[in-house]
Image (cartoon, grey):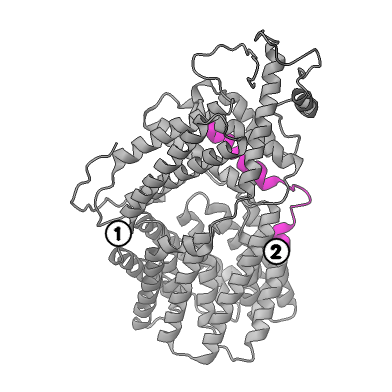
Amino acid sequence: MSSATPTSARVRRLPVVGALRLGRPSDVWFKPALSVVAAVAPPSLLLMTLGRLDLAPYTMAGSLCALYAHNRPYAARAKVLAWVILGMLGGLAVALVSASLTRNAVVLVTVGALLAAVQKAVCDATRVGPPAHVILTFVSSAALFVPQTPGQVPGHLALAAAAGVWAWLVGMAPAPLRPHGPERRATAQALNAAAAYAETARGGEEGAGARSAAYAAVHAAWQTLLAVRNRPSTTRRALERLVIRAEVALAAPADADPARLRSWARAVRGTGRIPRTGDPRREEDGLRREEDGLRPDGAGPCRTDGGARLDDDSLRRDGDLLRERDELVGVAAERAVASRPLWSRLGPLAPVAVRSALGCALAGYVSLALGAERPYWALVTAASLYQANITLTWSRAVQRVVGNLVGVLLFAAVAPVAQLGPLALVLCILACNFGAEALIGRNYWLGSVCVTPLALLVTELPGYQPTGELVTGRVVDTLVGALVGFVAAVAVTNRRAGRRVERALTTVDRAREHAARVAADPSSTPAALEAARRGLAAAVVDLRATADAAAGEWWQRALPQERVVLVEQAAHRTLAATVRRRGLLPDPGTTSTYTYTEGASP
């Protein structure tokens, strides 16, 4: 099962062209793009009317919270947005108070670096994003270098809080029109991923990649559906049934119908009726008659003493309904399980947090040494780099540098228009906000092309500044932040990555053994089997994410890739067996005709 682990350390090749390759846009790219415009425009225009556009950076801090939680169900989104706003206000408060107490640039850079590390760790641990910590770090770092007095701090925080409340309302605005929009999108993505895996089930690298993507999509769909722990609605139960069908397709891809899965996905994305996997008109009646020992159609007993063969269609239909009921019993049991405490999720993020603190601080110090007036640009550049491993951090550095260099050229072209007046400046800021969110899903560098002029335009809200100085300063700080930040990432090695892979392997082995025992026990309840199966699926997804993250780290021993593959394969076989044990798939070798005997279940 295990392979020998080489003792030599390896240095991995770093991509350049691949890091700039454009991908497909997000399915909902327009939602954050429109939301941020709707959140930024009213406060900015109001301040412009009052002649206090210099206060717009504070309202914009709250407005930018509208970028978050677009993939969460609305009940969960309300809580997440509230926490994001509170987190933004907390970071802004620390920055403003620090700026009011000292003008020592070294102290301010140090405070900014520590804030960036905390924001990075908390956002990663809570999986808040995109855009994760970058917006929070940008807001707090910029505020550190805005002259303040202690008496001004409450008013500036109040402006940010008011704009944050407006951003919360903007984020929740679609709820009355599409109350289950996020759940529908997550379910559709799971169905499409399962269909893609079914189409590539012949094996090979493509099939393996599609399988991992499909399991991740199904897992993400369950996370979305289970994010709200109150009693599920009829719509959410129907979506859960469709995700169960995606899981069935993963267990038996050769028997799945990709066209049907994609058809369900298309129907789910809209606002119409959700496709049903069973006959809802017969469900309650069928279950009630089954409990009374009658066939669902009322024609007679459901079981016979002699094990006689009964109507195949009705028994198959009734069996599907019973199995779906049992599946949803398991879902309800999982919904009642408490989530892991935050502190237990912060531990593995220590190396990334240290990288963030060290890299941001050094980038800021170097920028100060070069005479920069806005060292927070270098700090924010460094903060934006840090990803799950060195390889991804390098890719983000390439994307950031390319995007910023192109972005300053765009700013040079836009600046004359923005300087025509306050209204032109606000409109340019809104256009850059929209463009950044519309393009960043294709590739981070493409979004940075709009983010860079946006950041430069914000600095002109208190008053216009020479374009040449802004461009030069941004280019220098971008290069400093990217270089110093990446060097810090290389210096702070993550030697725990290999150990986390070993722990993930052990977790999958234990989850697989537990699921196999539960599946083999004829007395196991549907809830117990469903909990074991879902636990194993989550462990497999975590193993793949952990192995991928560790594979991109430097200066560590080679990973047991063969063992990872073998453990994944064994886990997938067990997952298929648990689905079969639930009766959602026939056992290999059985006929398509259902036979009921005394004591048997459909």
**366, 588: nearer the viewer:** 588
Look at the picture and state if 306 lies above or below 65.
Answer: above
Q: Amino acid at mark 1?
A: Arg
For the C terminus, give its image quadrant: top right
At 63% from the left edge and 61% from the top edge, which residue is drawn? 80
The label on residue 465 is none
The boundaries of the magenta stretch are: 169-194
Q: Residue furthest left?
A: 8
Neighbours of disc 2 within 10 Å: few (<14), some (14-19), many (20+): many
The quadrant holding residue 333 is top right
- Give the distance between the C-alpha atoms of the residues marked 2 and 1, in whole angstroms: 40 Å
Q: Secondary structure at mark 2?
A: helix
Q: Residues within 10 Å of mark 1 (few under 14, many from 20)?
A: some
Left or right: 348 in relation to 249: left
In this view, 410 is above or below 115: above
Identify which residue is drawn at 61% across, 51% down. Answer: 71
Residue underneath mark 2? 168
Where is 34 relative to 488, above or below?
A: above
Which residue is located at x 70 percent, y 42 percent? 236
On-image quarter of the N terminus:
top left
The prevailing secondary structure element of the residues shown in magenta is helix
Q: Earlier in the sequence, mark 2 or mark 1?
A: 2
Asked whether 193 falls inside the magenta stretch, the response is: yes
Horizontal side of residue 289 vs 532, given as left or right: right
Residue 266 in sight here: no
Residue under numbered circle 1: 495
Mark nearest the camera among 2 and 1 is 1
Q: What percent of the width, then of the height, locates residue 111?
A: 46, 80
User: Can you see residue 80?
Assistant: yes
Q: Position of residue 92 (x, y in %)?
A: 57, 77
Question: SS of the residue at dot 1?
Answer: loop
